[in-house]
Image (cartoon, rainbow, N blue to C red):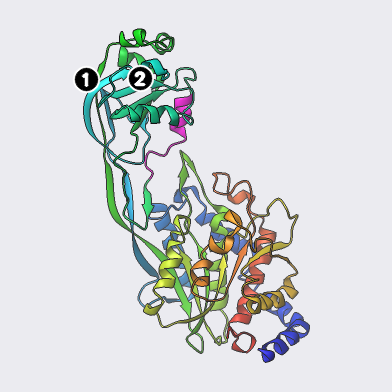
Amino acid sequence: MRTFYLLLFSLFFLGSAAQNSELKNVSATINIKTLKKHISVLAADSLNGRYTTSEGQKKAANYIRNEFNKAGLHPYNDTSFYQTFSLWSWRWGKCELKVGDILLQSYKDFIYRCNSPLDSINTDCVFVGYGEDDIINNIDLQDKVAFAFTKSYSNYYHLAYRLKSKGVKAIILTNPKDKNSFTRLVKSEDPDHVNVSKAKPFFSKTATRIYIVNPSLTKTFFNKNSNVLSQINTLEEAKKIKSQIISANCPAIVEKVKTENVIGYLKGKSDETIVISAHYDHIGKKGSLICNGADDNASGTSALITLANTYAQQTEIPDRSILFLATSGEELGLLGALHFADHQQELPFDIKANLNIDMIGRRDSTHKSNYIYIIGGKEYPVLDSLCNVANKKVGLTLDYGYAGRSSFGNILNLSDHYAFHKQGIPILGFFNGLHPDYHKPTDTIDKIEFDEMLKRVQLIYLTGNLLVNKQSYSNN
């Protein structure tokens, strides 16, 4: 350790000129034009937000694989750049709602609002108004469908609980006071959304099955429009409303699906390996709007591809091998990184450290410019010292403000570097902090600040150079 710090001291004072030359030598590959090129592909509308297992995610994986191949990286197992692993998915099948002989249309006339499927039912539909106690407590609802009015599609849970306690099979809700609210709700939903998880989905037997219908269809159910029915608030009036027969079902389609990490490596003089990682998946869509994820994490993936190409063009063989890991499933719980870390025995690599890149293209509200958050620096001070040496050339403010934060602020546990950290492998995460466009359709390429991003990629590159040099780093 004493030898390491003597070397570190020398690097602080002697490394600046060498690093200036080092950055100049790689400016042909580490530049704004290159970074922008990769983000433009990864954050394009055609990839539909790169949701794990989606067609857009597969397109992104194919692009990264081709770039790794063009750079001259070796496939991670010398056969394929893909490390494939299995997940579970579920989506709705054909959801139906029929009033007498009239078949309503999903996402035009109704939306099914529940996380559990509905087995086929055929039963009376009973009008209960806004859920007045006199009506709910004195009408037979056992094994029926309750039709209720609500003033808000986000604040009906107490009413639903009361109706469920009366034994209803399902609930139909509508908002007669705001006739445009159903249209807004439909626009906020993605009818093609697929839910993906590591575990096989579990569906509750007791969940409240809810249909939300367009208020213009009230007459279809009871031959009276919503203006008339909304005036009903007594048991006597409610009992006069003729009951309809409702047929309904909403099956779930459950399947095993596959996704893939994209991995390439450069062989060094030993099997000791530095992993540079970034996740390339994102959250898909919110309703009809695509969440392109330009910062999260097309920026990190662009940096990863750029670094792979830069290291691959160096003529001198590094002391350590370098593995470039583009993960899928990060947004679903670090699934790709955890799979890789849990299957290290499949690969002939002795992993010594991980540099993880997750959102490096923007600024947060607390900084004007010229900074980067460092994750893991407090936990791994030797590795952090190397980053500080590298930063002598770049001159960024290294912010450790996320260290020790709880909840969402604990980024140490909430990005792919955690998969390595939990196994005791030293890590550094590079992160620009949160901004108002995080996980929103507004995280687009026009908001990427490429001048800032370039300096961050330069810092990661220089830190990586020190890491692959055995003489300048040991985690022992």
* As drawn, 211 above or below 115: above
Kind of residue at disc 2: Asn
Point 43% across, 62% down: residue:
335
Q: Splitting the image into 4 quarters, where does residue 401 fall?
A: bottom right
Eye-nearest disc, 1 or 2: 2
Secondary structure state at the residue bearing disc 2: loop
What amino acid type should be assigned to the residue bearing mark 1?
Asp
Q: Is residue 202 above or below residue 107?
A: below
Q: Can residue 65 be seen at all in this image of the molecule? A: no
Viewer-proximal residue among 359 and 446: 359
Disc number at residue 101?
Answer: 1
Residue 403: image location, x then y, percent: 65, 64
Question: Total of numbered circles in the picture?
Answer: 2
Q: Residue at x 74, y 61 (%)?
A: 370
The dot on residue 137 is 2
Residue extending furthest right?
13
> Which label was assigned to residue 217?
none
Residue occupying the point 47% across, 50% down: 283
Q: Camera-side residue: 332 or 261?
A: 332
Does residue 359 show up magenta in the picture?
A: no
- Marks 1 and 2, how far apart at CA: 30 Å
**Side of 168 where 270 appears, left or right:** right
The magenta span reads 181-193
- Of residue 266 and residue 95, the one placed in the foreground of this image is 95
